[in-house]
Image: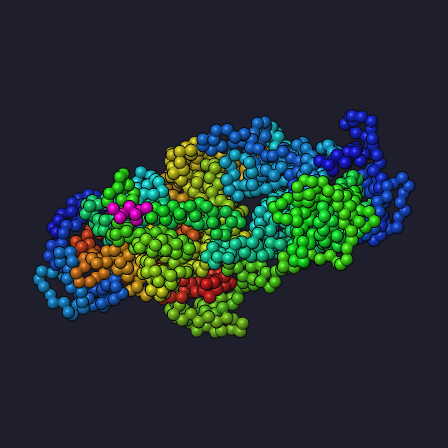
Amino acid sequence: MPLLALLSFWAPPGASGQETFPYNGISDQREGWYAFTGATIYTTYNTKLENATLVIRQGKIEELGENLPVPKGAVEVPCKGKTIYPSFIDLYTEYGLPEQKPAQPSGPRQQGPQMLTGKKGAFAWNEALKPEFAAHDNFSPDEKTAAEYRKLGFGLALTHQMDGISRGSSALVWLGAGNAHELVLKEKAAHHLSFSKGKSTQNYPSSLMGSIALLRQTYHDGKWYAVAGREEELNLSLESWNGLQALPQIFEVSDALDLLRAQRLGKEFGKSYIYKEGGKAYQRIEEIKGSGAAIIESLVFPEAYEVEDPYDALRVDLADMKHWELAPSNPGRLAAAGITLALTTQGLKNKGDFWTNLRKAIQHGLSKEDALKALTYAPANMLGIYDQAGSLAKGKSAGFLITSGDIFEPETVIYQNWVKGEPYILQSMEIPAWIGVYNLETDGRQWPWHVSGKPEKPDMKIKLSDTTDVPVSYKYEQGILTLSFSPEKDKGSIRLSGTLSNGVWSGNGQLETGAWVSWKASPAEGTPDEEKKRDSKKEVPPGPSGEITYPFMAYGWTARPKAESVLIRNATVWTNEAAGIQQQTDVLIENGKISQVGKNLTLKAGVREIDATGKHLTAGIIDEHSHIAISRGVNEGTQASSAEVRIGDVLNSDDINIYRQLSGGVTTSQLLHGSANPIGGQSALIKLRWGFSPEEMKFEGAAPFIKFALGENVKQSNWGENNTVRYPQTRMGVEQIYEDYFTRAREYGALKKSGKPFRTDLELEALLEILEDKRFITCHSYRQSEINMLMHVAERHGFRVNTFTHILEGYKVADKMAAHGAGGSSFADWWAYKFEVFEAIPHNGAIMHEQGVTVAFNSDDAEMARRLNQEAAKAVKYGGVSEEEAFKFVTLNPAKLLHIDHRVGSRPERMLIWSSGRTTRFPSMPKQRKPSSTAFFSSISNRIN
Amino acid sequence: MRYVYSVIVLFLLQLPVFGQLTVPAPKQEGGVVILHAKAHLGNGQVIEDAAVAFREGAITFVGPAADWRGSADFRVIEARGKHLYPGFIAANTSLGLNEIELVRATRDEREVGELNPNVRALIAYNTDSEVIPTIRSNGVLLAQIVPQGGTVAGQSSVVQLDAWNWEDAAYRTDGGIHVYWPRATRFGFQEAGADNTNRYAEELAGLELLFREAEAYAKTKEHQPENLKLEAMRGLFSGEKTLFVHANDAKDIQRAVLLGEQFGLRTVIVGGRDAWMIAAFLKEKQAAVVLQKTQSLPGREDEAVDQPFRTPSQLKEAGVLFCISAEAFWQQRNLPFQAGQAAGHGLDREAAVQAITLDAARILGIDQTTGSIEKGKDATLFLSTGDALDMRSSIVETAFIQGRQIDLDDKHKALYKKYQAKYQVKD
């Protein structure tokens, strides 16, 4: 490392003050007293001084101003024509930290699940929680990496271990050479979090909602530990966790929706996070903006997709193409929206792309001022160290860059990067006046040698003829120039070394053959050939097509749908009420509600009229059992109970199935946890408000539900031979799980009431809500024995099973269900997909209906959900239910099961107009859907082909 | 025959509930004439007030009821207001090879290994599967039993759905060889473009080489050693067997058709999700398509939401020979509604019937004897109270396979009756 060698000679470590480390040899402490004169100095991202002087001493800025005298005793560095910037701060690095390893080093692959942490010591139960990890404990400077950062202009890096959900604390370190203890500016600079469990080999959490639940519970655990927990257990992780709470909290998220999720979580606990986002924040900028968020963005932009072949191009979605187009505009859009922005090199395959991509971002709308702010002021401020770094001012650390000019211009070079008052030379500031044409002679040969462009970064080439030339690679250091070029291809290169004297370069070198020769280059006539401008390579900033759609994919809208007043004329109206099916009837919708149903209604001003002659008008379809619009995991099936997880935490508003199902008439869906465990997660009820944010999709004021499950799935019958450990493995055990959890939930409730300190247990909270009739169960069920069992459990514990879903043997116990008061939400005709459904019959719905059970048909399937009308029609075929009643299986009845029948399901608040004859006839595709009288789908807009 | 039938019924009635063991019907004795039904012939034609007569398993008369000259030999089935259809044909199904999806012991559709042209689905076809009667109850009376897995999965056979064992079920034995086309798409972020990795190219080259060797092998009988796999492919080159290629991507479909053309094979595409994009090519090459379920999700996020609903009508318009399938096994009872879905999206109603009758028969190579209600063909047909492609009105009352009136009871109807008894519901 020549630079390091040079440094230790020039400016020995420990340039100032006292220190604990012994020094081998004669001490050589120097003041580091320099005066940089005549420079343009950016003191902050938005103020600059001209012809100014910067004086530094002992690693700090001593003076700064225009026309200051050079102090006696200081080394003067003339910087006329140069520009000085505060050095950059990268907040997202793992600089100088060891590679992460799982708690249990790899051995023979473990059989079966890992239920607890594999880490030794009195730490948290979950291996993904590592608040005890401290970067400064593990930091070891790495000169090679530091040099890469310095080359880009960075002087400080915040470093942390990028592993786990709570990742511990980071350290802010100087990117200089030296020992760890000298380079740490601030230990415990921030607490780092994410949704990714990283290297943890423990099963829990397996889903995004599990990660969120784990964090939520840990916030509660931290509080409990501080008050009473230590009496119960020693938990070094919670101890550390509590110690980190007052720090800046940096949360890594992958995209805009993840950011909103973290934001919701933070709100619950009074935390406002700084987000490290994956370059897609622009897709939900309005929601993010409102939160006053601060974001660290990397400059990773997707490469262009190969789309030359028209069929292959079909594999690239519009969303991918749009992201490719708009990703470079992300930093600019965030800054323009007033979001506090910092930039990082993290994520770049090659750190050298940083400047290329930063300039691309500037071309796509990021102002230079905002770019500089995002590299200096903003990161310093986020960490609360603006008093020490992030700008140049008296008393601050001497961390700055000397450049040849405007740092954001491509031809600008960074000459020097001063870190904590120590110089790192990137390129010589002594530039010869070498632009011109020379006659280069050696070994009896002669060529014109062209040196063109900017003096600090010239292009060089040898002209072989008028039309052909070869590039010359060169290096210029301390007055010595080396050149290398190959006049003939594949014949080796000529390497020359020489110096400049009186305008003539001369010296010695080696030919292709290795023979030593002397050479000389004298100025010749003419002007050097300019390099062709790389106009063709210039990115074209996004034009009018660069619109953001909601959601950011095919069929997204640019103008937000609005509720309107509509008069629908002359439809066949399925009221789902005593009035039955009414012919040639008008329906008036005002303010999102049905205000009138009748014949020949008057058309008021401002009301849109729709002629529905020959068409049918019905309530919107309600899918009681759906798994669409859920991000990264429908099951947290790693434990017998996951009552703490919430589907509502992980809504995915960018699921194309929302749009597809709107096209099939669905306006409301209950999104359920999967059936991997007896006690699943909490459900979410959404309106299919396509393009709205996840929070806006939630059904306002819906009753809370939770998913339970019975049978083969929960006893892991079909999970393979590695899954025979988790309790329960039989239906016998399933009952006992319920008994146990409800018993504990009751005790928990008593503890809460007792006034004693208690640990908020989110799992038992959910179960307690069931006992208190504040939360309702949708239970996946097949066989009559277990259906019966759960009703008995519920009756013993004083509550009611709200809904059995699937319930394919409901027909065997329909009388008991009716007596208990449970509803049944079933498939029309599914069977034979596993052993426990081998007695499933398509007449199930009809029998339950006849026995007085409230019956719904659900989809559980993104394809089927587009034609639930047809599934309902199967109840006419199998069991002879009337068409009117059958259609209630997918409208009014699910509304009853979800406790929303006073709002939807009849006299429809959200409604459909069907294009074809009869509602249940197969071909029908709703022509227009109007949830809350806002049109989210019309059949005209659903074609792109 | 009716006596036998009643005895069975009586026997079953002695059980506390209705039974579920269906007994294959004996050969047709005497003649049957179905009068006054609306007959959907399967070839696109309809006779509003029809007479269809058959004896010894074959259709002897098709025409307006007014033209029927009665005969005492013919038992009359009065069917005014009802609909008569040829038996629906389920192409590309694992019916009888798969009883319960998640119970491995009940599955027989997938052999190990990449190249299994010698494997025969027929001999694993379980005539006693509980699923089969539930399929017949919706009018599906013939099925192509197809093996899965690997690149060359094996041979399919067409069976009729009322049999004691696979020998008498067999309708066309080992008529198809099934290739599952290698997939070009490799999934991975930022690599959504075409995958031209060596693996795909190697797989294609390997497939072509197999066909070259099989073609050469088929030219003589004298081989030492005899190769069972190449032996099994012999029929492809003589035209006895059809090459069924399972492919969905537009380019894969085209490659498959070109491969078939190169070796002069009768080629049928199965799946054919993108067939609508290359309809003109398929028409030109006279390649037929066993279409995936109409009720499928669009293949791509950006595709029109109703594309799969419209694909049949687009192929019809382009003149491509296709039939509609329902895939898998128990799902075959919804085959009629897969066709109905297409009828709702631009396909002529009788063309929708044709897509699960005559055109399926053509593609499976059995149209000389079945697939439509025409004189001389098998009397494989059924009566429905209403439109059989509409799930509300598809109540199959009476069905015949080769003139034999089959028992339309099934496990589900039996359980329905059993629990009606529990709740004392009067039938």
What residue is rendered at 64% in x and 51% in y?
A357
Q: Is residue A863 left or right of residue B97?
A: right
Predominant secondary structure in magenta? helix
Q: Is residue B360 left or right of residue A233?
A: left
Residue A729 position, x and y percent, is: 40, 34
Part of the protein shown in magenta: B213-220
Residue closest to the far left: B72
What residue is rendered at 53% in x and 49% in y?
B190
From what the image shows, is residue B128 above or below residue A546? above
Residue A595 position, x and y percent, is: 48, 66
- Residue in the foreground of this view, choosing between A112 and A768: A112
- Residue in the foreground of this view, choosing between A511 and B74: A511
In the rendered view of the protein, which quadrant contains the N terminus of chain A? top right
Residue A62 visible at all? no
Residue B362 visible at all? yes
Residue B1 position, x and y percent, is: 12, 51
Q: Is residue B350 magenta?
A: no
What residue is rendered at 84% in x and 34% in y?
A30
Residue B412 position, x and y percent, is: 27, 48
